[in-house]
Image (cartoon, rainbow, N blue to C red):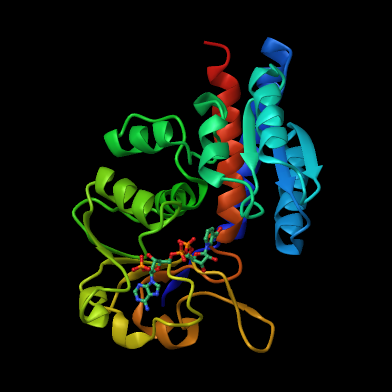
């Protein structure tokens, strides 16, 4: 019988651990980790994500500061806020909710964040550190996938790992982390030929393409571990992943559900990165 990897429970366990460490940090050093969440405009999906991040911070005892700026905010105004936050010693992590309105250059904004406070790990400095395997922060979603594998006792060493998707925030860092864990890694994308055949070689398949229930049983090797990163909305309004769960389930040894798999881990990893940034600020 296949294991359903319970991301919700694992994320709750991580949050409990972080809450304990936060208490210790506060007792020993007199401060708690602080996260600034900056949102420009009123995208409803972003508003939900931001709310969840504040709630998660409160739960583990972090300070969280929200900056909800109007859509007309200029690039200069946003850069000036980031400069202030870079210099604020109570803030250890800065997160700018993407996407930003079109008139703001996303790259310029991400470059302005102090790499020591870049808890999303999107700054090129931190991207480079992930590449060399010498890092403090890893982008939250791929970090969450690795933590799910670790805590589910799924060993990556020597396994054939196939990552489908090559975005900067999921696919590419995911491939690097699996490689670091001694997986034999193949990265696929929209130009990959005979994708199903490549996926059928995977002992561990990470699906991150953003296409509802795209991967059916013909993509899966018997006994494979399937990690579904995709979050999509079906025509009936329900959330689903990139994997056709019911069709794939009889073939796998373990699988993450959507919702309740990778999703909850992303925020848990954001808390972990913020805690790390706070600890590093003591050095
Ligand atoms: P992007 O759109 O940036 O990247 C999608 C990738 O999938 C691209 O590399 C693209 O290839 C590839 N792709 C698309 N269609 C196919 C196809 N038919 N066959 C093979 N490859 C394909 O998406 P993200 O990486 O940002 O996100 C991926 C999914 O993960 C989304 O559903 C998103 O909602 C979800 N997500 C979930 C998170 C979580 O917390 N669980 C966090 C972040 C994202 P190419 O490069 O050739 O265009």
Q: Is residue 95 shown above or below 283?
A: below
Q: Nearer the viewer, residue 47 or 133?
A: 47
**Residue drawn at point x = 28 percent, y = 34 percent:** 132
Q: Quadrant of the N terminus?
A: bottom left
**Residue drawn at point x = 77 percent, y = 51 percent:** 71
What percent of the width, then of the height, locates residue 60?
72, 37
Side of 211 relative to 195 (left or right): right
Q: Is residue 281 visible?
A: yes
Residue 133 position by quadrant: top left
What percent of the width, then of the height, locates residue 274?
60, 32
**Residue drawn at point x = 44 percent, y = 29 percent:** 136
Quadrant position of ligand 1: bottom left
What percent of the width, then of the height, locates residue 228?
46, 68
Q: Nearer the viewer, residue 105 or 259?
A: 105
**Residue drawn at point x = 57 percent, y = 30 percent:** 113
Side of 212 relative to 66 (left or right): left
Q: Is residue 255 shown above or below 182?
A: below
Side of 233 relative to 169 (left or right): right
What percent of the width, then of the height, locates residue 244?
46, 83
Q: Nearer the viewer, residue 58 or 209?
A: 209
Residue 233 position by quadrant: bottom right
């Amino acid at each position: 019988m296949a294991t359903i990897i319970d991301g919700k429970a694992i994320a709750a366990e991580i949050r409990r651990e972080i809450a304990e460490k936060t208490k210790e940090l506060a007792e020993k050093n007199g401060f708690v980790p602080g996260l600034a969440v900056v949102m420009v405009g009123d995208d409803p999906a972003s508003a939900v994500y931001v709310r969840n991040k504040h709630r998660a911070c409160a739960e583990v005892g972090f300070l969280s500061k929200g900056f909800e700026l109007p859509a007309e905010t200029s690039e200069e105004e946003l850069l000036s806020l980031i400069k202030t936050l870079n210099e604020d010693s109570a803030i250890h992590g800065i997160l700018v909710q993407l996407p930003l309105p079109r008139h703001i250059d996303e790259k310029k904004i991400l470059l302005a964040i102090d790499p020591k406070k870049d808890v999303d790990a999107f700054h090129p400095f931190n991207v480079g550190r992930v590449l060399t395997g010498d890092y403090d922060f890893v982008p939250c979603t791929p970090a969450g996938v690795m933590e799910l594998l670790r805590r589910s006792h799924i060993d990556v060493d020597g396994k054939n790992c196939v990552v489908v998707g090559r975005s900067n925030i999921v696919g590419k860092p995911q491939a690097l982390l699996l490689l670091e864990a001694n997986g034999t890694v193949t990265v696929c994308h929209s130009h990959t030929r005979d994708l199903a055949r490549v996926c059928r070689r995977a002992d561990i398949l990470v699906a991150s393409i953003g296409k509802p229930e795209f991967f059916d049983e013909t993509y899966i090797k018997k006994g494979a571990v399937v990690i579904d990163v995709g979050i999509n909305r079906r025509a009936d309004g329900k959330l689903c992943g990139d994997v056709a769960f019911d069709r794939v389930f009889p073939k796998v040894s373990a699988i993450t559900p959507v919702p309740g798999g990778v999703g909850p881990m992303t925020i848990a990893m954001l808390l972990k990165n913020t805690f790390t940034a706070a600890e590093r600020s003591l050095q």
